[in-house]
Amino acid sequence: MAIEDMVKQLNELLNKTQEFLRKERESSIRSVESGILANRLESSVTRLSMNQSVYREQLKRGSKLSSDYRLIHNLEVALTLRDDLQAGWTETVVELVHADTYSDFLEMAEALLAKGYKDAAAVITGTSLEVHIRALCVKNGVTTAVAGKPKKATTMSADLRKAGVYDGLQEKEVTAWMGLRNSAAHGDYGDYDHAQVRRFLDGVQAFMRKFPA
């Protein structure tokens, strides 16, 4: 889902909520509608944010409030999420829209490889793989940073294996793929050939289908 679509979804619900709050309603009806809108805002924020994000944590803090107060609380959380998305929510946005992004990047890698640009294709494929591994960690509750610093892809892959997301053989394959990507990124173009990049690209595509994030 593109960021523009996320913002559009939030705006539609935010506008409806704000319009509701401007109207005078009977207290019993207001309570029912407040609960419905509060639930819709919570659902929207949960769907458009990542596991363990500050937005979901904020939702939890307001979960025991009465319907009217929970509506205001969830409205504030949704507004914050909408504004952060519009301002540029770098890494997490990449993870949220990774399916579309991967498709675009891997198609680009395919085109480059077909034209003989194996090195660029290897770098793009490796970058897509690293982002996917990070998204898998987020999905499975595996930390992606240590002391505030992002983990390397191979470290995250080892953690995914420890968490039982995939086995040791898959971890070794990911490590080999990242080695090829690193060779390309560091200019060691003689360490691999066109056929190896072809297998790399095919392998990453199969990996993403088998372990969706």
Image (tube, rainbow, N blue to C red):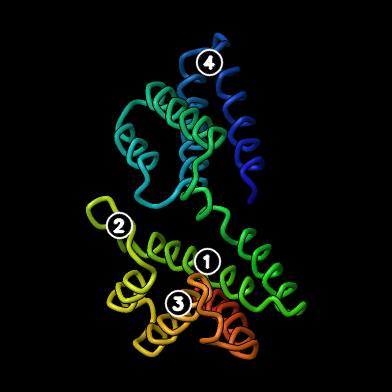
Q: Amino acid at mark 2?
A: Ala
Q: Amino acid at mark 1?
A: Thr
Q: Distance of mark 2 from mark 1, alpha carbons?
A: 17 Å
Dot in front, 2 or 4 = 2
Dot in front, 4 or 3 = 3
Q: How many labels, in total?
A: 4
How busy is the neighbourhood of tag 4: few (under 14 within 10 Å), some, or many (20 plus)?
some
Q: Is residue 108 left or right of residue 136?
A: right
* Residue underneath mark 3: 178
Local secondary structure at mark 2: strand
Picture coordinates of residue 148, whole percent (x, y):
27, 50
Front residue (pair 167, 70): 167
Dot in front, 2 or 1 = 1
Q: Distance of mark 4 from mark 3, alpha carbons?
A: 52 Å
* Residue underneath mark 2: 145
Picture coordinates of residue 158, whole percent (x, y):
31, 76
Q: Are marks 1 and 3 in contact (CB under 8 Å)?
A: no
**Rendered residue at 61%/23% (across/down):** 15
* Residue underneath mark 1: 127
Instruction: Name the N-terminal-most of marks 1 and 3.
Output: 1
* Residue underneath mark 4: 21
Local secondary structure at mark 1: helix
**Rendered residue at 60%/17% (across/down):** 19
Q: Distance of mark 1 from mark 4, alpha carbons?
A: 45 Å
Q: Distance of mark 2 from mark 4, alpha carbons?
A: 41 Å
Instruction: Name the N-terminal-most of marks 3 and 2.
Output: 2
Q: Amino acid at mark 4?
A: Leu
Local secondary structure at mark 4: helix
**Rendered residue at 53%/15% (across/down):** 21
Front residue (pair 41, 114): 114
Q: Quadrant of residue 208?
A: bottom right
